[in-house]
Image (cartoon, rainbow, N blue to C red):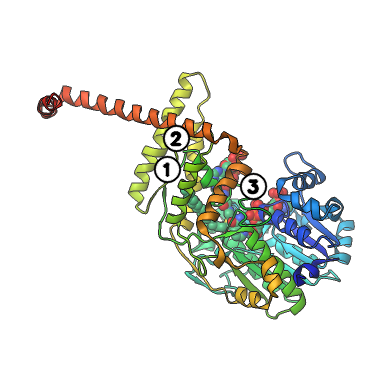
Amino acid sequence: MSMIAAFYDNKSILITGATGFLGKVLMEKLFRTSPDLKVIYILVRPKAGQTLQQRVFQILNSKLFEKVKEVCPKVHEKIKPIYADLNQKDLAISKEDVKELLSSVNIIFHCAATVRFDDPLRHAVQLNVTATQQLLHIASQMTKLEAFIHISTAYSNCNLKHIDEVIYPCSVEPKKIIQSMEWLDDAIIDEITPKLIAGRPNTYTYTKALGEMVVQEEGSNLNVAIIRPSIVGATWQEPFPGWVDNLNGPSGLIVAAGKGFLRSIKATPMAVADLIPVDTVVNLTLAVGWYTAVHRPKPTLIYHCTSGTTNPCNWGKMGLQVLATFEKAPFERAFRRPNADFTTNYFTASYWNAVSHRAPAIIYDFYLRLTGREPRMTKLMNRLLRTISMLEYFINRSWEWSTYNTEMLMSELSPEDQRVFNFDVSQLNWLEYIENYVLGVKKYILKEDMAGIPEAKQHLKRLRNIHYFFNTALFLIIWCLLIARSQMARNMWFFISPLYNL
Ligand SMILES: CCCCCCCCCCCCCCCC(=O)SCCNC(=O)CCNC(=O)[C@H](O)C(C)(C)COP(=O)(O)OP(=O)(O)OC[C@H]1O[C@@H](n2cnc3c(N)ncnc32)[C@H](O)[C@@H]1OP(=O)(O)O
Ligand SMILES: NC(=O)C1=CN([C@@H]2O[C@H](COP(=O)(O)OP(=O)(O)OC[C@H]3O[C@@H](n4cnc5c(N)ncnc54)[C@H](OP(=O)(O)O)[C@@H]3O)[C@@H](O)[C@H]2O)C=CC1
């Protein structure tokens, strides 16, 4: 019998960010392993014309929740969506809802955040710092609260090379940052942003670091714990391999490479690709929830959820396996044949950007114009290159994260819990995982049927022939121009041509 699963039975759980990538997998595992839990409250906002109920309905009817419906047929009754917007004061939760939460919640998992790298500092502070502070304020009034688990990122201190499971203070206190956002205007905030984030590549990592400080300072009267996952990828094992549903991190680049838009990238092949499967993060999160509530460790424990220390994989190996999977199961209607050249040199990268990315986009747009259609490829390519420039920081460096607390937790689990809530990535087979990841991107993001693989292969063959034809034509044109203009080229031609008749 799993002690962790039993712990969540009859509990009222509050999850923020439950409609996100991590939140959905967290909810799924909770329902699957602890179907007797009392209720999961989720803080949700209406989005894309969908009401809260419609959003919940869509999640529960997805493939991810198929197993849950078998083990927990009443899952619809056990999810309670609560209107909330983390952009607004007091999270915009109604008084009645706050009252219900205060009297019933046992465990909080705070996953919601803005994960955009280019968010203006004001917005990132509101989501990742102020909203966390307000949630802690509500949590401190909850009469039955046993644990508050905050999801941060392993990159919150990416300005350091070696990172321990401790909180590193930022130069300006979060309270001062929050206050200053109230009166500074946008232009001044934009001006001071580079100075504040100093050493970090974006507002995301900076505000996640501030969020951790808030949790430590304002959660001191609660049982809190912080989890720092690295780059969260598709599921490894549960509920099935390869599930992924958004374009963040590697997933977007896999789509771009598989469709032939992205053909080279400035990346260091030997740098560690610190991916961590989303189900591993969820297993650790649930184990931390249990441990924090039952053992009440003081001071606040931070858990690194990374793979590089125990089972390192590098970007070079990952890139090759991604390409090998494209060979077996190509994506449909590719723009060009997939390729992924890694270069560490700025000038080579700029050259390939011009030749492999921008030039084909301009040529294709020219073709679209000629055939009376709206050109769109250059715009799409510019967007992709902007995205890549933001990810480059993470694919050209390696970090070391210590994992003492995570190892300590593993040793505290019973053998059954180690099996059901496995977060030991030393058992992960990278080649198999990456293949399933790419297939997951194909099936669950691009919604492509595996039956379409023969046609996709045919399409790639056609692209290869076009490529050969295009190159031969280009060669002949250049050669004819040379012969017309250069005596040396003509001499060479007269020298070579009799050889063909031998
Ligand atoms: C060969 C293989 C090598 C693999 C090599 C992997 C390296 C992979 C390193 C990751 C390293 C992370 C390390 C930190 C890990 C955390 O702790 S953070 C969690 C991860 N967070 C992220 O990845 C967020 C990154 N994304 C962003 O910040 C924003 O999407 C960007 C990049 C600023 C783009 O903003 P934008 O231009 O306003 O675009 P946005 O509105 O987001 O989306 C526009 C379109 O692009 C699409 N799109 C969005 N993101 C992407 C993307 N990443 N790629 C492609 N398309 C995208 C959208 O679906 C959308 O399509 P439409 O709906 O318009 O058709
Ligand atoms: N993905 C990754 O690689 C990593 C993620 N993390 C951390 O994990 C956590 C979850 O990330 P992930 O699931 O990938 O992110 P997603 O972007 O998939 O999910 C973010 C969640 O936050 C919610 N949210 C955002 N803004 C608001 C708002 N104004 N009001 C209410 N809810 C809001 C979103 O709701 P909605 O659906 O309405 O937009 C969504 O549920 C984050 O804390 C992130 O920092 C850490 C390391 C890596």
Q: Residue at x 55, y 55 (%)?
A: 433
- Find the distance from the CA under tag 3 to the CA under tag 2: 24 Å
Residue 205 spot, x, y in % from top left: 57, 60
Check mark 2 vs ligand 1: CB closer than 8 Å? yes or no. Answer: no
196 on left or right of 23: left
Residue 57 visible in the displayed image: yes
Residue 150 spot, x, y in % from top left: 69, 66
Mark 3 belongs to which amino acid? Asp
Mark 2 belongs to which amino acid? Arg
Mark 3 = which residue?
245
Against 410, residue 232 (above or below) is: above
Label 1 crowding class (10 Å Cα cut-off): few <14, some 14-19, many 20+?
Answer: some
Mark 1 belongs to which amino acid? Asn
Mark 2 = which residue?
336
- Find the distance from the CA under tag 1 to the CA under tag 2: 9 Å
Secondary structure beneath disc 1? loop
Say which label, 3 or 2, has the lower sequence index: 3
